Image (cartoon, rainbow, N blue to C red):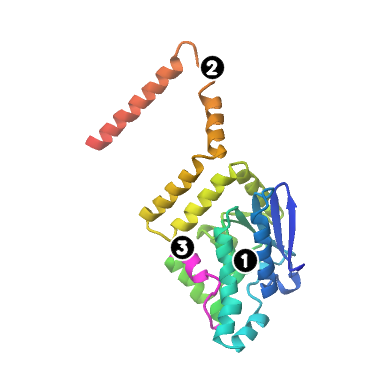
Amino acid sequence: MSKTVLMQISEGIALFTLNRPEKLNALNYELIDWLMVLLDTIEVNDAVGAVIITGAGDRAFSAGGDINEFSESVAAGVNPAVRDFVRRGQLLTARLEAFPKPVIAAVNGIALGGGCEITEAVHLAIASDRARFAKPEIKLGMPPTFGGTQRLPRLAGRKRALELLLTGEDFSPERARDIGLVNHVVAHEELMPAARDLASRIMGYSPLAVRSIITAVTRGLNMSIAEGLLVESEQFAQMVPTDDLSDALAAWKRRHVHDDPPRDGRATTKFNQTVDNLRNRSDIQQHG
């Protein structure tokens, strides 16, 4: 069993800790492979509803690919470099992006190169106010290889992504939030509580509904809107025969339909007036 990634399960949340603090949690091949194994394990564990990924120590989430290791693959030629390094990293980020349970990055320090690409690929991300981000691959004479040329422009927009990719300059967690790389920035000591709170809020809903939303969004981003709408319809259709949907609808009806209405009927009258007002406004907008 590898110790490059530690896993702890608590209250339905699997915490993955990238555990190479002496190397700033650099992504060597063993770590990537073990992370894939753990994802396979968690996917079929019905007791786990969400995953949080963070880095060991206070300095780094991940400094990116292990340069010493992948430089050996580069020295061996094109095929080993692409097979051992590029393909391995791309499979990891694709797995994270399409994982059927929410994956949250808790970025506790520097997130460079592949560490930034993990942040791009996961569904949600929260950054410590001590985090720093960068896409420094250009300084090594290479492009990003774990999906950064594709996902970052989709998050940040083409020009902002190209500026980060072509300069390799580091940027703050606040800028990461502003360009859509992370959802929130919190004080360092609040990072893990915030990540757990976000995971718990999502886990309060139907796992099947969560999975269907992740699938529709992830697949739809690489399609036309018309094609994406078909995916959305398919995901809804799969929910129709499930207890998750029928139970949730029944619960909603118990809360909203079977409540004792006012005996004088004022609630119904007010509702009908509201509907009429909305219709009138719609008519004005259409014919004005």
Amino acid type, residue under disc 1 in the picture: Arg
Between the residue at mark 1 and the residue at mark 2, the CA separation in whole angstroms equals 55 Å
Asked if residue 59 shows in the view, the reply is yes
- Secondary structure found at label 3: helix
Residue holding disc 3: 154
Left or right placement of residue 279 versus residue 229 in this view? left
The residues colored magenta run 141-157
Residue 281 x, y percent position in the rendering: 31, 31
Question: Is the residue marked by circle 2 packed among few (<14), some (14-19), or many (20+) residues within 10 Å?
Answer: few
Left or right placement of residue 150 versus residue 251 in this view? left
Mark with earlier residue (3, 1):
1
Q: Nearer the viewer, mark 1 or mark 2?
A: 2
Residue at 54 percent of width and 40 percent of height = 242
Question: Is the residue marked by circle 1 packed among few (<14), some (14-19), or many (20+) residues within 10 Å?
Answer: many
Residue holding disc 1: 132
Amino acid type, residue under disc 2 in the picture: Asp
15 above or below 266?
below
Nearest to the observer: residue 105 or residue 136: 105
User: Can residue 162 be found in the magenta stretch?
Assistant: no
Nearest to the observer: residue 161 or residue 10: 10
Residue 9 x, y percent position in the rendering: 74, 53
Instruction: Looking at this view, name the residue that lies furthest to the left.
Output: 287
Residue holding disc 2: 260
Instruction: Identify the image quadrant of residue 113.
Output: bottom right
